[in-house]
Image (cartoon, rainbow, N blue to C red):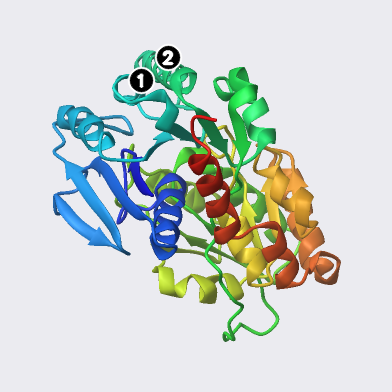
Amino acid sequence: MKVLMVLNYYYPYISGVSEYARIIAEEMVAQGHEVRVVASNHAKLPQHEVIGGVQVTRTSVLCKISKGTISPSFITRARKMAKQADAVLLHLPMLESSVIAAGIDPSKLFVAYQCDVNLPRGLLNRFIVKVMDASNNRCLKRAHKIFVTSVDYAKHSRIAARYDHKLVEAGAPIKPLTRQQVDRPQGIKTIGFCGRIVEEKGIDVLLEAFHLLQQQRDDIRLLVGGDYQNVAGGSIYPQLQASIQEKHIENVTFLGRIAEEDMAEFYSSLDVLTLPSINSLEAFGMVQVEAMMCGVPVVASDLPGVRTIVQTTAMGCVCKRRDPQDLASCIADVLDHPDDYRKPRDFILSCYSTPKTTQTYLDIMNMQGQ
């Protein structure tokens, strides 16, 4: 089968959406399918290259607005390439989605609806959200099927909830990581975070929770992994550093972007991973499953979709969003009672895996038109 994937950002840009698309694309190639990707050229990358067997085409960017790119040729290229594909998969949210979808046969148009758009307050951002919602809504209306990471998230979505009859719960592709042997500081518990250093991740809430814990115990440190230099829409790293200095928070280390080959080692160095995200831009949180595969329990915020991983595996706690005190309490419980939250890796794989998610996509795409 010839599959075309369309999304604004693709590898080497790292985000939940771009990694989701990349892992599925490469798994489809491994299973013998031809996969092409069209994305915007956000960072002066090659216009054409092959990554992991996936043929990637990037279109020129005129400018960027907030987290989005403006690339007129992106629309025309996607619609042209769609004519040669058996199935077209758009990864939303995407400003151009309705225009691209209008030029594609609905019977072969599929959407991976990743999340609702949620931007900081402001007149411009409010306008952007309204335009994005309208475009995404028209695209979903035209699509044959809509893949979501969880029905829990979709039912709480401003957009996807309208199309219950089209929803397909696919989960998310997961890198099959394994726990590594690492040197760990004696007598110290390590709390971790991994993700882009942006507002919606709730890292400021995590810092406040960590500060509260430090007032009660002296055996903890915090490792924050994730890019804070090349982030669409801007990073909140300066604000976080200012807060650390103002409150005199100690034992916090920002690691920057962690190479893919080092992720298992990073997770294995932790006693607990946190995902304190605060809004609907976080729909699942693949890092949770990756950490669990390395034997690390998770504390995640009570967001639709995000909470389902801990609820399914029982390998961690769900905390109230935007609540540093509750986050601190949940972290402390996991640190003090680790055996209560340990689950076998095979059990995690039975719940979440890349082949399982990819097969869901392929099965539905092969049934197109039925």
Quarter of the image where one finds residue 333: bottom right
Total number of numbered labels? 2
Residue situated in front as seen by the camera: 340 or 48: 48
Q: Secondary structure at mark 1?
A: helix
Residue situated in front as seen by the camera: 307 or 300: 307
Taking 67 as reference, is 213 left or right? Answer: right
Mark 1 residue type: Ser
Residue 246 screen position, x and y as percent: 50, 48
Q: Are marks 1 and 2 in contact (CB under 8 Å)?
A: yes
Q: Answer few, some or many: residues within 10 Å of disc 1's Cα (few below 14, many 20 plus, some between 14 and 19).
A: many
- Disc 1 marks which residue? 98
Residue 90 visible somewhere in the drawing: yes
Q: Answer few, some or many: residues within 10 Å of disc 2's Cα (few below 14, many 20 plus, some between 14 and 19).
A: some
Quarter of the image where one finds residue 76: top left
Q: Secondary structure at mark 2?
A: helix
Residue 318 screen position, x and y as percent: 75, 47
Q: Measuring 26% from the left and 42% from the top, which residue is drawn there?
A: 39
Which residue sits furthest front? Answer: 370
Residue 269 visible somewhere in the drawing: no
Q: Measuring 41% from the left and 66% from the top, which residue is drawn there?
A: 258
Residue situated in front as seen by the camera: 30 or 107: 107
Taking 237 as reference, is 305 left or right? Answer: right
Q: Earlier in the sequence, mark 1 or mark 2?
A: 1
Taking 350 as reference, is 46 left or right? Answer: left
Kindly report the distance in space between the C-alpha atoms of the residues bearing marks 1 and 2.
8 Å
Does 213 sit above or below residue 79?
below
Mark identifier at residue 134: 2
Image quadrant where one finds the C terminus: top right
Residue 335 screen position, x and y as percent: 76, 66
